[in-house]
Amino acid sequence: MIEFRTGDATGAELVVVPVLADRVIGAEDGVSPDLESLSAVLDVHDFSGKHGQTLFLQTPEGQTPECLLVGLGAEVDHEALRKAAGIAARAAKGYSTVATALHRVGIDGAAGAVVVGTILGSYTFDEYKADPKTSKLASVTLLGEDEVSDEIETAVSLAAGVVLARDLVNRPAADKPPAALADIASGLSHDVDVEVYDEDAIVEAGFGGLIAVNAGADRPARMVVMRYTPEGATRTVAFVGKGIVFDSGGLSIKTAAGMETMKTDMAGAAAVFGAIKVIADLGLTLNVIGITPLTENLTGGSAQRPGDVMRAYNGKTIEILNTDAEGRLVLADGLALAAEQAPDLIVDIATLTGACKVALGAGIGGLFASDDEAAEIVGAAAKAAGEKMWRLPLDTDYKPLIESDVADMKNIGGSFGGAITAALILSEFVGDTPWVHLDIAGPARADKADHYISKGGTGFGVRTLVEVARSMT
Ligand code: BES
Ligand code: ZN
Ligand code: ZN
């Protein structure tokens, strides 16, 4: 983990300097070079200060600090800062001691944004590499800050939650059996009580969706319930995360290509773990319940078959017509369990449908809500956190598409609107509790690194869930 300090640039190997559009130095920091005198160099490198541009200014051999100019563009907000910090961190990964002036642009909360962008931008997943390309960045000094403020510490904690989620998503499915993830949940924080339902307890409780999906797997399922109940809290939010540690599709098997990234299918659960850890670390005054049904979706001899019917925790039955639509089955149990606790709000988060990824692309999550107020709470939180979510309709006119001949509903809709029919199925399990469903099939994973996003698991959703909790305190 990078250590953040405050003060001056003494001892730094590199100083990061923000440049606004049209080569305006972004900060009064005492370290920025005179860009006017450098205009010939900047011309050669076509460096204008456009957001995301970087330019190293070389110093004579052995002389430090070197300087890294980072373009911030014309409109500087928190997201621009996070991105620029991520880009700078990536560019500076060969240096161990860096000082930065990126945050000195006269915006409240800039230091926090720079810290988050720096940590996330320097993230790599190297556990399985003989020759890791891990960032050397060990210490970053935020120039001109008096002290490591609460804002900085909060940002470090938030980024650590995202890093935890990324690590869990990136870990191969073979090495994250449900029981191991349940153990990780149990160790998240002293302030979080964790109840783990093992295979017997799952049968006893009647988590029929989790049982049905787990039937084709050798490694047993777990239902994890995390409870953070700080003194003085009056309101309660429940987070429910899809935790399919691997999705082969089951008997309705996926293609080889479709399966390649399916270790990502527990990204919802990973986001809930990360968020609860952060919330407990920050000591937010709000009751938080985290629920993660954990299993893999495989094709063993006892696997569920198309045509089978399962009964969820709330007694409702679902006819399985496609075993690849398994997330909604385990979420049915998770949501019913959440609703039973009568929270003020339920937010579920799931890599639920390819259809949502088709609709919104890889960068934007789908948001469905039981009502406008719930949509507003979570939509505003996502916006504040810098995670893109777009509301999609929970249109009950499509309900006939999930009618079953033999059960209360079937687990797939028609050929179109798959993200909506999936959300409509989930809506059957929350009762009257205000509820938001986040479909993160697209943004849970990135094909390539970009600013503070790393290739592979992104940890998407952690920051939104934390912000939801913060906004409800
Ligand atoms: N885990 C997948 C959804 C998914 C697809 C996430 C691609 C990320 C990238 C989910 O369990 C699934 O397979 N859904 C099916 C549903 C269909 C059978 C109704 C899908 O989206 O194709
Ligand atoms: Zn599936
Ligand atoms: Zn899935």
Image: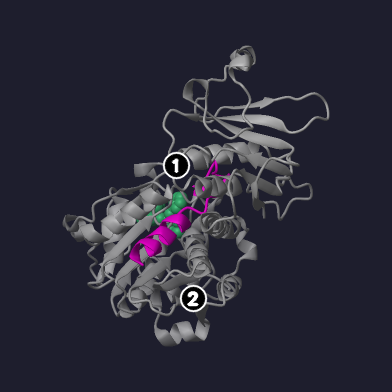
Q: Mark 1 falls on what kind of element? A: loop
Q: Nearer the viewer, residue 49 or 32?
A: 32
Give the class, few, some or many, for how many residues have Cα within 10 Å of label 1's Cα (few <14, many ≥20): few
Q: Is residue 407 above or below residue 398?
A: below
Mark 2 and mark 1 lie on one chain; the one further toward the N terminus is 1
Residue lying at 44% horizontally and 71% vertically, measured from the top left: 290
Disc 2 to disc 1, how far (Cα)? 40 Å
Q: Amino acid at mark 2?
A: Val
Task: Assess whether residue 359 is covered by the magenta stretch.
Answer: no
- Quadrant of residue 377 in the image? bottom left
**Residue 11 x, y percent position in the rendering:** 76, 42
Q: Which residue is mark 1?
A: 107
- Residue closer to the observer: 128 or 147: 147
Q: Residue at x 59, y 20 (%)?
A: 35
Disc 2 secondary structure class = strand
In the image, which disc is placed on residue 243? none
276 horizontally vs 381: left or right: right
Q: Magenta includes 463?
A: yes
Q: In the figure, 231 relative to 296: above or below?
A: below
> How far across and down, in percent of the image, does residue 388 sit?
39, 46
Q: Is residue 52 above or below residue 377?
A: above
Badge 2: how crowded within 10 Å, few (<14), some, or many (20+)? many
> Looking at the picture, how far across and down is residue 334, in whole percent?
39, 72
What span is colored magenta in the figure?
445-473
Residue wearing tag 2: 224
The answer to whether mark 2 is within 8 Å of ligand 3 is: no
**Colour scheme used in the picture?**
one colour
Q: Residue at x 60, y 49 (%)?
A: 119
Q: Is residue 58 visible?
A: yes
Q: Residue at x 46, y 55 (%)?
A: 463
- Left or right of 366? Residue 446 is right
| Percent x, y of residue 120 | 58, 48
